[in-house]
Amino acid sequence: MNTLEFHRHGGAGDDMFEADRAPVDTHTPASSSIVADVLTVARRRKWIILGATALCLVLGLIVTLLMTPKYTAQTTIEIQRETQSFADVEGAKSGAAGAMDQEFYQTQYGLLQSKALAERVATDLRLYENVAFLRMAKIGGEDWFTGNTISRAAPPREQRISAVGGVLLQRLEVVPERNSRLVVLKYTSPDPAIAKKVVDMWAADFIQVTLERRYGATAYARQFLEQRLAQLRNRIDESERRLVDYARRQGIVNLPSSGAVGASTGERSLAADDLSSLNTELASATADRIRAASRLAGSGTSNESLQNGVISALRQRRAELAADYARLMAQFEPEYPPAVALNRQIRQIDASIGREEARVSGALNENYAAAVARENALRDRVNQLKSGVLDFRQRSIQYNILQRDVDTSRQLYDALLQRFKEIGVAGGVGVNNIAVVDQAELPGAPSSPKLLINMVAALFLGLALGTAAALLIEQLDQGVVDPGEVENSFGTPLVGTIPVTEDVSVASAFTDRKSVLYEAYLSLQTNLAFTTTHGLPRSIGVTSSRASEGKSTTSYALAFTIARAGHRVILVDADMRSPSVHNWFGADNKVGVSNYLTGTDDLGALVRDSGTENMFFMAAGPQPPSAPELLSGERMDHFLDALLAEYDHVIVDSPPVMGLADAPLIASRVEGTLFVLESKRTQRDIARVALNRLRSAHAALLGIVLTKFDARQASYGYGYGYGYGYDYGQKNDA
């Protein structure tokens, strides 16, 4: 028998079983699936979560009430950026201002939390000999104290100061305010007065320590600068003497510099000035010569003539006379006196134009010759000055070295003198970059414990622990509670989901065709019609992994809905070890399947009327010595053939699979087998073993029916409330 293919489908008015018919949406976002799974687990394990939350709330309340109240005093100080160090030299700074500020303020925060400052506070407040503080801070043992005084057995003063400083540091909190120069100092103590004293003294000592460190630095700086200034003065005098002596011996005469950018010294030489001036004149002369040559080369094309006003006027007059002469020639002969006179004037004008053009050409030649002569003279002078400048530069190398030495010494002297003046003013005034903005106030209410915060933390902790416990239990629980898990878990399609009911019996629920239970089994019948090419299988075996999962109820309900559809159907009880079908109809179990398999041929005497139109049943009959021997014989095949010849469909209520050979034997002979799986109670591993046994027997699995399903425990959004109920046959269902 070939394995049957299951096709899911949908129908109008059957939305509540959409999960049975529609495949899992593989395009659903993973985050939505995870959220739905968590919410489902929370609904199923709500009492575990609520119990863990309640326990944490109670523990949080108890711990809060038992905690010692603590008070926090705080003060606000402002830390301004320090002025530049006396050793700073402009141009030698490294790093961005932001990075420098960050480094400076991190240093200040570290100084605020230094052990030296904490021990100074302990010393100023004399906390090292305050017995009440030492006991409150749990410093030392009772052997340290004699009543309200320090005993001789106590450690030396320095050790007690160090111990108190360590406690102060542990309870001090430095909180910089973002995007500002303000820093908040907080100190927490069971005694509000001690908290206020410590935080006030901490700010005051920090200011005092900063001033002392600054004064010590300026005193050393003044002494250092005085010595350095004296050395620089002697060095400047000696450098200037060497410079003047060298200039006198080499005959170097320089003029004061005009402030040219990039000048290495404050002076310039006469030779360099002359060379620069003559070089400018030479460039101008070369340009004049080029222009004269260009004008001379273009005279042949009458460019200069065209620009000459006299020549232009003569040419205009000649054109007028030529026009008059042409008009006379149109009427008279050339010997006509007026024509002869005009011709003579034209020749005179042509001669004048020739003389003017010759004069222009001569002037151009003279200008070109003058430009060439001037350029040559300037070039000779520039070459002479170049030699002089090169010689001057060779002699000025040592001069420039001496000049730079003088300038450097003078700049260092001026810079250090300015720093010396600034340090003197700062040291005398005692400027401080730290100030107290807000003094500490005596705390009026404890800062801890805070009941609301602790209870909120306990609430979240309880929810987290409860959720973790619920998820752990959910992982350990192998029961199937969600229809969407069936196909992925067992590799067999889900063909029906039967809701759990508690108030009415199955028979009563089937009398109402609008009942949820009837619609569920009707949906199962409809789904089975798509499992074969010819519609609903003619012989169907119904089994489960163990007893009391709802297989007998499913067998009865399936036969009932098929009969209601107008098909002749017979319900056969093949569970000869624990028969139950006859109980559905209030009949006895005296005769049935076992009688036929042991040799009775009168099939009509074994079949009984159920009282429902088109529906018949056959009880299991007396229990045989060996049910597997009967089910594996040839009589079983004849039995099914005989029933199929008489009825449209045969529904076989089979025994459970686990521990028995009956169910696989029956499954190998029917056209298809339904596997009933009880929601939540049936373990996945047991169900897998049972299904594998059926597959090993070459059973054609039609699908899985999930019974006693509670929609409230599933991750799908079933919106129907199952108000109808029925008993799953604690005594009727095997």
Image (spheres, rainbow, N blue to C red):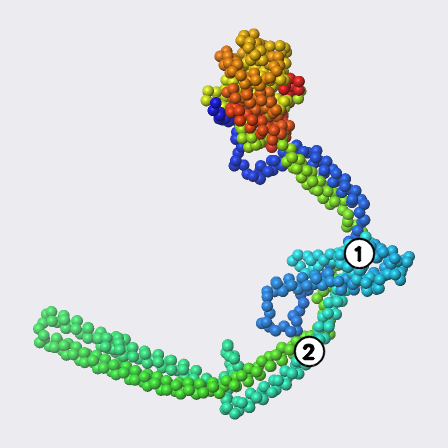
Seen in the image, is 29 located left or right of residue 233?
A: left
Mark sitting earlier along the chain (1/2): 1
Residue 154 locus on image (x, y percent) = 86, 61
In this view, the residue in front, 647 or 658, is 658
Relative to residue 304, is residue 264 drawn left or right? right
Disc 2: which residue: 224
Three-letter code, disc 1:
Ala
Q: Which type of secondary structure does the marked residue at label 2 adopt?
A: helix
Judged by depth in the image, the label closer to the viewer, 1 or 2, is 2
Q: Amino acid at mark 2?
A: Phe
- Judging depth in this view, the residue of 10 and 500 nearest the camera is 500
Q: Position of residue 612 (x, y in %)?
A: 57, 11
Q: Residue at x 66, y 80 (%)?
A: 228
**725 to 396, vertically: above or below:** above
Q: Say if mark 1 contacts mark 2, CB within 8 Å.
A: no
The answer, for residue 484, to whether it is visible in the render is no
Q: Which residue is mark 1?
A: 195
The quadrant in which residue 352 appears is bottom left
Q: Nearer the viewer, residue 541 or 615?
A: 541
